[in-house]
């Protein structure tokens, strides 16, 4: 989208009654979403507690020690102290680094070696710290959900 379009779209959405905003690091527009949220809170259209904000942990941040860095970047971009729901975007790690979609010379994805169950443990810490009010997953199949439920401390609230 062109600069400013996402911000205007989110402002309009809030004006007509939207209260659930779905974000993700991979969408690369969280700063504009944050600007819209700030504007609508400042002008009194909504209070923070009226909104349900979702974002997602991207695949290049799957190492458990990187999950806090990732959510803090998201929170900074959105201008928030917490998200209502933080999801693991995909149950696969990509190689850590600056590239959103790191690829090998042949164009294939540079897959990381982090087990997504370890990633979940990092997300549980975000929940415990109050950076995410709820945690969940996205794009998981039934076998992955079963494995997660058998090994987690904090159960996912959803699979988007």
Image (cartoon, rainbow, N blue to C red):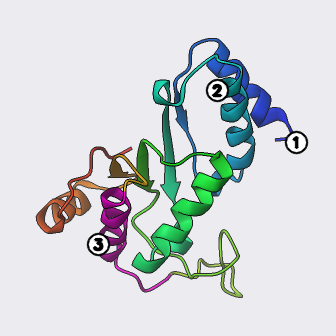
Task: Name the side, left or right, on which 122 lies relative to 51.
Answer: left
Q: Which residues are magenta?
A: 112-129
- Helix, strand or loop at label 2? It is helix
User: What x and y, as percent, mark residue 70?
Assistant: 55, 66
Q: CA distance from mark 1 to mark 2?
A: 21 Å
- Helix, strand or loop at label 3? It is helix
At horizontal 42% and vertical 41% (from top left) the residue drawn is 84
**Where does label 1 land, which residue?**
3
Q: CA distance from mark 3 to mark 1?
A: 37 Å
User: What x and y, as percent, mark residue 132?
Assistant: 40, 51
User: What x and y, as percent, mark residue 152?
Assistant: 18, 65
At horizontal 66% and vertical 14% (from top left) the residue drawn is 15
Q: Which mark is residue 117?
A: 3
Closest to the camera, between mark 2 and mark 3, is: 2
Quarter of the image containing the C terminus?
top left
User: What x and y, as percent, mark residue 131?
Assistant: 43, 55
- Residue 1's image quarter? top right
Mark closer to the chain start, 3 or 1: 1
At horizontal 22% and vertical 54% (from top left) the residue drawn is 142
Looking at the image, is 112 positioned above or below residue 50?
below
- Residue 5's image quarter? top right
- Is 26 within the magenta? no
Q: CA distance from mark 2 to mark 3?
A: 36 Å
> Total of numbered circles in the picture?
3
Closest to the camera, between mark 1 and mark 2, is: 2
Disc 3 + disc 1, Cβ < 8 Å: no
- Helix, strand or loop at label 1? It is loop
**Where does label 2 land, which residue?**
41
Residue 129 or 132: which is nearer the viewer?
129
- Residue 113's image quarter? bottom left
């Amino acid at each position: 989208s062109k600069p400013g379009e996402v911000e205007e779209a989110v402002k309009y959405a809030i004006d007509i009654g939207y209260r659930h905003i779905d974000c993700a690091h991979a969408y690369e527009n969280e700063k504009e979403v944050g600007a819209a949220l700030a504007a609508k809170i400042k002008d009194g259209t909504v209070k923070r507690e009226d909104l349900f904000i979702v974002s997602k942990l991207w695949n290049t941040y799957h190492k458990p020690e990187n999950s806090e860095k990732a959510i803090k970047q998201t929170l900074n971009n959105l201008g928030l102290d917490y998200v209502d729901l933080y999801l693991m975007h995909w149950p696969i790690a990509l190689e850590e680094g600056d590239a959103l979609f790191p690829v090998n010379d042949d164009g294939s994805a540079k897959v990381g070696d982090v087990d997504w169950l370890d990633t979940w443990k990092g997300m549980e810490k975000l929940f415990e710290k109050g950076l995410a009010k709820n945690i969940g997953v996205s794009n998981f199949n039934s076998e992955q959900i079963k494995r997660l439920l058998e090994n987690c401390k904090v159960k996912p609230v959803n699979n988007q």
